[in-house]
Amino acid sequence: MHLTRLALTDFRSYGELSIDLAPGVTTFSGPNGEGKTNLVEAVGYLATLGSHRVATDAPLVRRGAVRAVLRAAVTGAQGRSLVEVEVNPGRANRVRLNRSPLARPRDILGALRTVLFAPEDLALVKGDPGERRRFLDDLLVATAPRYAGVRADYERVLRQRTALLKSAGARGHLRGSARESVTTTLDAWDAQLARAGAPLLNGRIRLVAALRPHVSAAYEAVSRGAASRDVGDEGEIAMAYRCSVSDSAGAADPGAEAPGGPGGTGHAEGAGIAGRADEVAGLETAMLKALAAVRASELDRGVCLVGPHRDELELSVGGLPARGYASHGESWSLALALRLASFALLREGREDPVLILDDVFAELDVGRRDRLAALVSGGEQVLITAAVPADIPDVLAGARFTVRAGTVHGAD
Ligand SMILES: Nc1ncnc2c1ncn2[C@@H]1O[C@H](COP(=O)(O)OP(=O)(O)OP(=O)(O)O)[C@@H](O)[C@H]1O
Ligand SMILES: [Mg+2]
């Protein structure tokens, strides 16, 4: 799919902007701080209802304005569509598809699909486990929008169960009927948490298996033939899903493999990420068992110790955990490989998502630049930002825009 138009009102540094876009490569260049990333952030927001830079919506609205409006005309296999999002910080967004309001904002997901790589993605490798869980969940939603509901349900149940654990813990050692009532209530919440968590867990496990060969291939493709600038850069990449449920329940880890182990099992190809009922039921049982096993410590600590929110996507380079060991260049290549792998997975048997590369070329040596360019040049639509246009390899010549102080001009 591709965008044919992007229009913004009071988004970030833009008062009013409308640009026409075409399939193929489009580059946005201009000095630092002029609004290049703001543009591609808007495209990402239209696709995911979230920013890759900030967790809340307030910074997205132009200073002094009360709301931002983002619009994209999208052409894809399903024909043309108009996606519109009104960002109202602190309140629900309003979303329209082809001018019809949608009851729930998340119903817009899937109308525009993007994969965005940006400098912030270094946190995928170097940051907390939460960054990698978010990466998996965002990608799950991109592969199958119904996971937005699965994820929201789980987060809601988790919040409520955690609140209950906290209040029960705060009341100390309950006795008699008070204790019984907490136990009964917790049993009910365990069931709900397992019911909501199992499909999310199943989706993530299948996703990791489907993604694994793409990550290895992308890492290899970007770093292959690298000069000795990054020592050890040729190290093998491994990715494993560490599951708190199977750890606590003592069951066999359903999806993980030892770092540095063999490649993917291949049991979950792109189209098969949509979970299987028997696997989900098995995970629900395992989660209930794991919850029972940690009940006492959960009450002591007032936190929910088992579930997808405690899991980790372990990444390693050359047998060592990437977080804490990988060099800057290795971390950058691995983060890039995760996004390129996402792109490869999302386009498997379906139309291409829009690929967005924010400021990526400046960080890469010439060999990596050229290999990355060759990898992405065939994408249906690729949006690229760069402060220095000369950093972008010639094979990515396409439409060019210059960005200056909140205005965007065609450069050719
Ligand atoms: N809510 C907002 N209201 C007004 N201006 C904003 C808002 N949010 C960000 N800006 C401005 O937008 C500019 C940043 O734009 P952006 O991040 O797109 O720059 P860039 O062109 O990508 O720069 P670089 O090359 O450094 O990455 C900053 O000057 C910032 O002050
Ligand atoms: Mg930028």
Image (cartoon, helix red, strand yellow):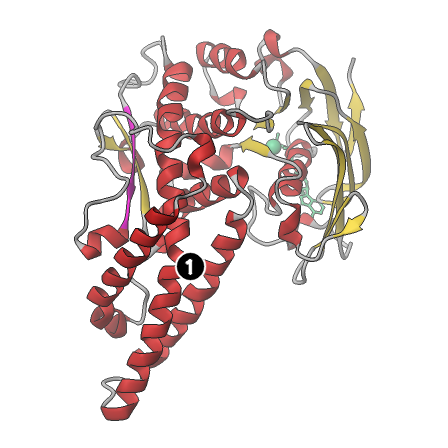
In which quarter of the view is residue 355 placed? top right
Q: Nearer the viewer, residue 407 or 346?
A: 346
Quadrant including the C terminus: top right
Where does residue 132 sit, x and y in percent of width and height? Answer: 40, 42
Give the quadrant of the N terminus: top right
Locate residue 323 relative to residue 404 in the image: left or right: left
Reply yes or no: does residue 240 show up in magenta.
yes
User: Is 57 left, or right, of 254 in this rendering?
Assistant: right
Q: Which residue is mark 1?
A: 196
Q: Main secondary structure of the magenta part?
A: strand
Residue drawn at 42 percent across, 25 percent down: 337
Q: Residue furthest left?
A: 250
Tell me the SS state at disc 1.
helix
Residue at figure coordinates x 60%, y 25% from the top left: 351
Q: Is residue 29 visible?
A: yes
Residue 274 % position (x, y): 45, 41
**Closest to the observer, 143 or 317:** 143
Against 294, residue 48 (above or below) is above
Q: Residue at x 65, y 62 (%)?
A: 90
Residue 306 in view here: no
Q: Position of residue 275 (x, y in %)?
A: 41, 43
| Residue 246 colored in magenta in the image | no
Point out the quarter of the image occupied by ligand 1.
Answer: top right
Q: Amino acid at mark 1?
A: Ala
- Residues 86 and 328: in front is 86
Q: Position of residue 389 (x, y in %)?
A: 64, 16
Above-or-below relation of 149 to 275: below
> Magenta segment range?
237-243
Please name whichever residue, 178 or 36, is drawn nearer the observer in this view of the structure.
Answer: 178
Q: Quadrant of residue 309?
A: bottom left
- Quadrant in the rendering for residue 327: top left
